[in-house]
Image (spheres, grey):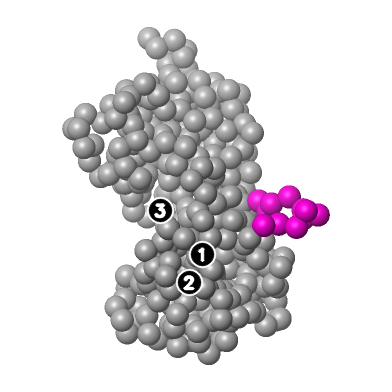
């Protein structure tokens, strides 16, 4: 397809635009808002990053995805202006801004939509035509859904977090697993994070202790870290980091018995495909609104540390130099959570701590 537009499944004209150029996990958590707005206004268009486009381009609520490479080909005022002109030509009636950035607000202004809806606490809130109070508590999904406004009393339950997988996505995951002799019921591990202090150091020891096949997932940037985990048990632990695209990775997670992950995007991908999660939290806390949502999901964290949480995202280096929130989380505790969620057991040496 020419330009940044992606093929769509719905030819009806779109009047509603959502601009969401935040991290991958944030884009996944925006999918219920996409569905809610589409229910009211028809298919919605989405501006997002090239990396995140795959997460929404197959969603049934989405008409067209426009890629905005804000740190690459579209960086600077020139890229902002060019995309703004394209948005203006599409004549949107309304724009929703879950991402509270000045850049997103500038795009909404350049689009010249009559209605611009965003959170009242955003730095660019004075540019919005409707400012929605951002809930201070609750999950980020519900906070984002508040942008859509109150639901009618007869409304159906809120839409779920959802990444729509294609037959090709599932086939790619199936082929990767089949090529390594891995069937359903494996344990998936996601040891990576762009934030250094969010990475729990116990993944290799956990992988060695588990008694079933293990698949390590992540992006290309996680490949080296994933290889150190896979080396803990050659032949039983397999490295899929960077081997599949985002939806292919989600399709792989859909085949897992459980995902063990840090507070990072794979947590939300697993939620989107219905896989139970053991989430390891260190410098951040689930109360921030980004924890797992499933009935069987478990959070493992060091609850007694007074220095937690230390930042909104988790810094690259522990501010106090000890990183106790992750270093002191025992492999036994995470292994017990895996067993509780999925029934997968570990070797006796780990279960007893000997």
Using the rendered image of the protein, determine whether residue 169 is visible from the camera's viewpoint: no
Name the secondary structure under disc 2.
Answer: loop
Quadrant containing the C terminus is top left
The local crowd at label 1, few if under 14, some if 14 to 19, many if 20 or more residues have their Cα within 10 Å, is: some
Residue 157 among those drawn in magenta: yes
Question: Which mark is in front, 3 or 1?
Answer: 1
**At which x and y percent is residue 55?**
54, 61
Q: Which residue corresponds to mark 2?
A: 128
The image shows residue 335, relative to residue 107, as above or below, that is above
Q: Which residue corresponds to mark 1?
A: 131
- Viewer-nearest residue: 262 or 185: 262
**At which x and y percent is residue 132?**
53, 60
Q: Is residue 229 left or right of residue 55?
A: left
Q: Which mark is residue 219?
A: 3
The local crowd at label 3, few if under 14, some if 14 to 19, many if 20 or more residues have their Cα within 10 Å, is: some
Q: Which residues are magenta?
A: 150-160
């Amino acid at each position: 397809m020419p330009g940044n537009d992606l093929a769509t499944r719905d030819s009806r004209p779109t009047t509603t635009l959502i601009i969401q150029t935040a991290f991958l996990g944030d884009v996944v958590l925006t999918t219920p808002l996409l569905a809610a707005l589409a229910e009211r206004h028809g298919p919605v268009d989405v501006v997002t990053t090239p990396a995140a486009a795959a997460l929404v381009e197959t969603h049934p609520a989405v008409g067209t995805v426009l890629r905005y490479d804000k740190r690459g080909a579209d960086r600077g005022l020139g890229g902002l202006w060019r995309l703004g002109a394209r948005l203006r030509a599409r004549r949107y009636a309304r724009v929703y801004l879950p991402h509270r950035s000045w850049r997103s607000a500038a795009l909404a202004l350049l689009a010249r939509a009559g209605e611009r809806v965003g959170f009242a606490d955003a730095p660019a809130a004075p540019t919005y035509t409707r400012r929605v109070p951002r809930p201070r508590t609750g999950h980020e999904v519900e906070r984002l859904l508040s942008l859509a406004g109150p639901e009618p009393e007869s409304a159906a339950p809120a839409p779920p977090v959802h990444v729509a997988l294609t037959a090709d996505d599932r086939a790619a995951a199936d082929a990767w697993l089949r090529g390594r002799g891995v069937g359903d019921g494996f344990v998936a591990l996601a040891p990576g994070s762009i934030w250094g202090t969010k990475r729990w150091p116990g993944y290799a020891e956990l992988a060695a202790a588990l008694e079933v096949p293990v698949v390590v997932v992540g992006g290309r940037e996680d490949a080296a870290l994933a290889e150190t985990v896979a080396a803990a048990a050659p032949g039983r632990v397999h490295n899929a980091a960077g081997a599949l695209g985002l939806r292919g990775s989600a399709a792989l997670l859909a085949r897992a018995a459980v995902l063990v992950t840090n507070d990072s995007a794979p947590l939300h991908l697993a939620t989107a495909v219905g896989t139970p999660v053991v989430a390891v939290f260190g410098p951040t806390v689930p109360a921030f609104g980004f924890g797992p949502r499933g009935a069987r999901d478990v959070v493992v964290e060091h609850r007694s540390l007074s220095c937690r949480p230390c930042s909104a995202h988790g810094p690259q280096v522990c501010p106090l130099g000890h990183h106790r929130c992750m270093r002191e989380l025992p492999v036994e505790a995470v292994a017990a959570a895996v067993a509780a969620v999925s029934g997968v057991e570990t070797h006796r040496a780990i279960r007893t701590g000997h």
